[in-house]
Image (cartoon, helix red, strand yellow):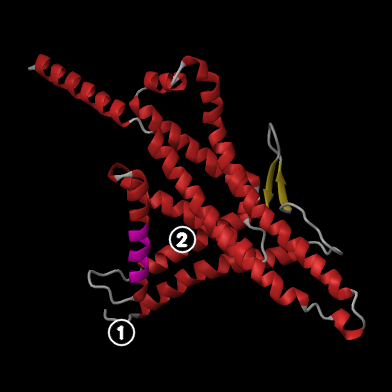
Amino acid sequence: MTATKKSLKFILLDILYLAMIILPFAGAIVLKVLITPQTEGVSLTGAIILWQIPMPLQDLYITEVQINSWAVVIAILGLVLFLRHGLSVKPYLKRQLVLEWIVEQCDNLVMSNMGQAFMGFSPFICAIMALSAFSSLSSLLGIFPPTSDLNIIAGWAILVFILITYFKLKGGFFHYLKSYTEPIAVMTPMNIISEFATPVSMTMRHFGNVLSGVVISSLLGVFLSSLTAGLPGLLGQIPFLRVGIPAVLSLYFDIFSGCLQAFIFAMLTMQYVANGFPGEAYEKRLKRRAERAARRAAEKA
């Protein structure tokens, strides 16, 4: 296959991958139009509940947040499959150059913040940034952004907290418990609070910044509409103030701030994991394991 000649199968797969990118968001937009009730004036509410499934302890609520989250995941999957379609040793597709640039940038980011030992984290960090950025940018399509729901961000933060704890335990369970007494034993209560404050701070920082942008944009739109409504005649019927000013603010709240929060969340993840990893204690633990294994082998011999 060359750059100028593509098989029918190749083209059909490209169409399928592009459909995976477009159709989930199109479906989310249609669902938003169908389920959103008509209101007058400004209405700032949470995600609309679609289904309520009875459960033993607490009912399970399926909201538009879950639907939009799956739409983002499927769209990212379609984008990745599209970019990696047609990979070759000698690139002839521009999409491969884009994919290689993304991989290179993620590798450099992980290398500079976590070191060579954590290069396996590169796909995870890339996935976090893509999921967060696409979720925030979905507000440009008029759907409820998943990052405006506290539960979504809390789920990501809990996952990161589990990773942090896992790598802290690499040095041994007793070494992990001892870390709570450093630098002095009196600081143990504060260290415990600080440990569990990590996922809370990550959640509130990301959630608060994204939600505030949605609220400010909505309030500004209503305020500008009220200004034009007081004008006489035809001028009062044309919302000309809602054309330029909200678009400029959207560049910050919907695009810059959303991408920035995705980058900050990924940076915090890398810093917490890398700083929590006890490298020296882990090396000593591996050395002791190797010595015990050598002794057992010598005894058997």
Q: Secondary structure at mark 1?
A: loop
In the picture, measured across the screen, residue 7 lies left or right of residue 155, that is left
Q: Secondary structure at mark 2?
A: helix
Decide whether the magenta segment is chiefly helix, strand or loop. helix
Q: Position of residue 277 (x, y in %)?
A: 37, 33
User: Which amino acid type is shown beneath numbered disc 1?
Assistant: Lys
The answer to which quarter of the image holds residue 146 is bottom right
The front one of 195 and 185 is 185
Residue corresponding to mark 2: 77
Label 2 to label 1: alpha-carbon separation: 26 Å
- At a point 75% along the width and 74% down the height, the residue shown is 242
- Left or right of 222? Residue 257 is left
Image location (x, y in percent) of residue 253: 63, 61
Q: Are marks 2 and 1 in contact (CB under 8 Å)?
A: no
**Which residue position holds label 1?**
5
**For the N terminus, which image quadrant?**
bottom left
Stretch of the chain drawn in magenta: 96-105
Amino acid marked by disc 2: Leu
Residue drawn at (51%, 60%), measured in percent from left and top? 74
Outermost residue, right direction? 232
Which residue occupies the foreground of this view, 47 or 177?
177
What x and y, as percent, mark residue 267? 45, 48
Q: Within 10 Å of the Cα at label 2, are there few (<14), some (14-19), or many (20+) other Cα atoms?
A: some
